[in-house]
Image (cartoon, helix red, strand yellow):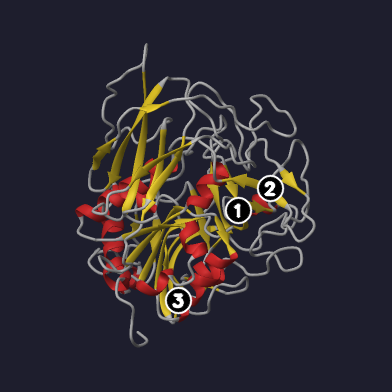
Amino acid sequence: MTAGDFLALHVSTDAPIYRVRFYRLGEELEMVRESVWQPGSQHSPPPHPEGPPAGASPAEDWGWPVAEFHIPTDWRTGIYLVQFIEGGPGSEDSAPLLDSTTIEGFEREFFVVRPQRPGEHSRILYKKSTFTRHAYNKSDRRDLERTASLYDNPVYLEGGEGGPRGHKVSLHRPGGVIDLAYWDAPFISWLERSGYPVEYCTDLDLHEDPDLLASYDLLLSVGHDEYWSQAMRMQVEEFIRARGNVAFFSANTCWWRIHPVDGNSAFISDTDHHVGAEYPHLPATDQWWTPAPEGVGLPENSLTGVSFRNGGMWATSDGTWPGDRPRNGYSVQHADHWVYEGTGLRDGSGDGVQDCLGAGTPLIGYECDGAAFTYDAEGVARANGVDGTPDSFLILGIHLLNPTHDDFHRFKPGHWNCVVREPGVTSPRAATMGVYTAGGTVFTAGTTDWPVVCGRETDAGVVRVTRNVLDRLRVRATAAR
């Protein structure tokens, strides 16, 4: 949506009245508007077809009544947070304002305002990974765990009559705010206080508008960016061929393909996730890297340079998120590259000390991607391209993903997520930071938590590398560099 449009919020509440506060994520969380009281009414979610406890379907539009709010024409492009406040007897009519420490939680939602004239304020486009958010959204509320998502009590459709088979997820469900608070908020705050104007879009915007990227020179993918449609992928690849630049400050990127359906209000993805105790369909045909016809046959690392199959994730035994992980950082390679300019980091050549980028911080994880590689005679890791990584991909930082022991860090290698096709590893597992050029230039951080470390400025080297990437790639090259 753009400034001047009407925002449709679907609301169910047992309170007789409610109101809405709007905030913009920026250098600070800024409250920009508060609505008048609205009449409330309570509505049940659609039942789950298999009837699990809590009974909510992740696959259906929940059909709650709509309240429309006009977005003023002077609102800046950005990600906006919505806070729902109940009123009436026994309710807290004057809830405290949210701040940067209280973005996460229930009774919250977010939306993106795009500029009316794309590219007018910035040639940098920040893509919010909304499809991934919806895949993981459990539709819980503060007092009830519905656990209804693509991962928890999913709904699987067999397809037919031209429709895709796979797990179906509706975008029209509640669920509160989690990922936005963890990855996006600190990074957006850093961008604004560091003087980088950016414009914003969602995955759906990119999917629906084939001309969206024409107004920009640099696309940002931030945090956890796992679910991509075919149209998204094709448009970003064409953007790169046309000398557009991409910075993947993300990981587990473009791991599953999705098929938007129902007027793009839901999507289907055939994935390796259980339904009950069974895999409904193996091999799952929406894995990007798996050769056709058992998969898409377009390895994600041909776009990003890296893949989750060569990386992995850390988790905790009790399922809490994010899990602990080693804090060794990336071993630096090619310290004379422009990405490292001004960091003072060394790569160990000439029998010197090899520095690590982000050492002492949880930079590597919570999920991370890697390139298949081999070591040359000097011990430098070089991408071998055996699984689709571009020939020009240069490994600038690497971290071998070997857990200390089975009970510590609880590392799960990426091939665990596609075990039916790849029961063993095909390359040493290593989180990989690197860069390649194929028309435009593509930088990949290879880790979901890069925007957290940069945004909170917990490592000067990570901050400087981020600045170098933005400063270098914010203007599309007119000639090969």
- The image position of residue 95, as x and y in percent, is 29, 23
Sequence-wise first label, 3 or 2: 2
Task: Give the residue type that dot 2 points to.
Answer: His
Label 2 sits on a secondary structure element that is strand
Residue at 56% over, 36% down: 138
Mark 2, residue position: 167
Q: How many marks?
A: 3
Q: Residues within 10 Å of mark 2 (few under 14, many from 20)?
A: many
Relative vertical location of residue 94 with respect to residue 319 in this rendering, above or below: above
Residue at 35% over, 72% down: 215
* Quadrant occupied by the N terminus: bottom left
Task: Give the residue type that dot 1 points to.
Answer: Gly
Q: Nearer the viewer, mark 3 or mark 2?
A: 2
C-alpha separation, residue under disc 3 versus residue under disc 2: 31 Å
Q: Residue 147 shows which numbered tag?
A: none
Mark 3, residue position: 240
Q: Quadrant of residue 317?
A: top right
- The image position of residue 132, as x and y in percent, is 53, 50
Task: Give the residue type that dot 3 points to.
Answer: Ile
- The image position of residue 185, as x and y in percent, is 33, 45
Q: Residues within 10 Å of mark 1 (few under 14, many from 20)?
A: many
Is the residue under label 2 in contact with that under label 3 (CB below 8 Å)? no
Sequence-wise first label, 2 or 1: 2
- Which one is in front, 478 or 342? 478
Mark 1, residue position: 414
> Is residue 277 among what the camera can see?
yes
Q: Nearer the viewer, mark 1 or mark 3?
A: 3
- The image position of residue 253, as x and y in percent, is 52, 58
Q: Is residue 32 left or right of residue 169?
A: left
Is the residue under label 1 in contact with that under label 2 (CB below 8 Å)? no
Q: Quadrant of residue 48?
A: top right
